[in-house]
Amino acid sequence: MDRRPQPTRNTLGSQDLLQLPVLRALLRERSVTRAGQALGLTQPAVSRALARLRRRFGDELLVRTGKDYHLTPLAQSLLERVDDAVAAVESVFAADFDPASSEREFTIAVSDYAIAMLGRPLLDLLHAEAPGVRLVLQQLSTATADFEEVVRRCDGAVLPPGFVRGHPSARLITDRWVCIAGAAADVGDAPTPDDLARLPWVASFGMTLFRATPPVRQLRGLGIDPQVDVVVEGGFAAVPDLVAHSHRIAVVPARLAARYADLPGLRVLDCPIPRNDHVLSLYWDASATDDPGHRWFREVLGRAAGATGGEPRPA
């Protein structure tokens, strides 16, 4: 006897529209508990919604394997379509987007450096213009380095050029790279490429992104492959403390280095490469381009970037 849930009907009703956000949260989070947290619903309420969705589709959608849940093939195929459907519904109701009264949530994936640069001015603008809007800052990680998926699932991702392709973007921040060296590092005030080849490094964001930074790409073009002593997966914030008082060196954005210029045992030095611009842009899914709420949010992000001394382009 087939005990699988059987589909109930094929017509679209109001309950289907109400369950779309729940379905999207379940497919994204692959967890009843996390989906409830994302939606602000209790676990029993989400469990009841999952049971209804299973009957609606005639499919388990989420299957437990050990302690984890996995998507069924049907659920996997629904993921992108559900995102598109929710975006389309949201765009209908966002036609007259009013920041002052909106309670919308915007999620952007960012590095710790981007949070340090954009966080305060962005929050100040949101508080002044849209006090009901909620901001979710999802920290980028090389452990989940599918940046195409990140851009698709969030309202945007703040990334250097070249990490995602085929998505609209707007420049937010232009900085430059500098070297930071520990007090025990055998290097003068003007390090040379040979110095960078000789000294041990602290690499941020893991080796994949480290090798993709402009300074390291240029050094490798000269036949110099930096000797990495320590790898930090979480971003730039921990790097100055790991370098201070040591014999190590690292490259970090200049504005971040300025915040640590007075850290004992740390020196901030010029980076001996000709092209050392550090550019960050906002990337978003093309389906959100004409959404009035998203367009407003991009414009606010641009103004926040401008408050940091960046050179944002119109979004």
Image: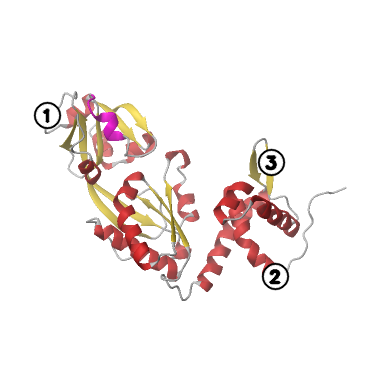
Q: Tell whether position 41 is magenta.
A: no
User: Residue 151 location, x and y as percent?
Assistant: 45, 54
* Neighbourhood count class around disc 3 (C-alpha, 10 Å): few under 14, some 14–19, many 20 upward: few
Q: Secondary structure at mark 3?
A: strand
Tell how many labels.
Answer: 3
Q: Is residue 31 visible?
A: no
Q: Earlier in the sequence, mark 1 or mark 2?
A: 2
Badge 2: how crowded within 10 Å, few (<14), some, or many (20+)? Answer: few
Res 302 quadrant in image = bottom left
Query: What residue is rendered at 26% in x and 40% in y?
Result: 252
x, y percent for residue 76: 62, 51
User: In the rendered structure, which disc, 3 or 2, sits on the residue that comes first in sequence?
Assistant: 2
Q: CA distance from mark 3 to mark 2?
A: 29 Å
Separation of residues labelled 1 and 2 (CA atoms): 71 Å
The span from disc 3 to disc 1 (Cα, nearest Å) is 58 Å
Task: In the rendered view, tell whether residue 1 sits above or below residue 242.
Answer: below
Three-letter amino acid code of the residue under disc 3: Arg
Helix, strand or loop status at disc 1: loop
Density class for disc 1 (Cα within 10 Å; few <14, some 14-19, many ≥20) is few
Residue type pointed to by label 2? Gly
- The answer to which of marks 3 and 1 sits earlier in the sequence is 3
Q: Which residues are magenta?
A: 239-246
For this orientation, the residue located farthest to the left is: 189
**Residue that carries the numbered disc 2 in the rendered image:** 13
- Secondary structure at badge 2 equals loop
Q: Which mark is residue 64?
A: 3
Using the image, determine if residue 69 lies above or below residue 132: above
Taken as a whole, is the magenta stretch helix, strand or loop?
Answer: helix
What x and y, as percent, mark residue 36? 60, 52
The residue singled out by tag 1 in the image is 188
Rendered view: 145 above or below 279: above
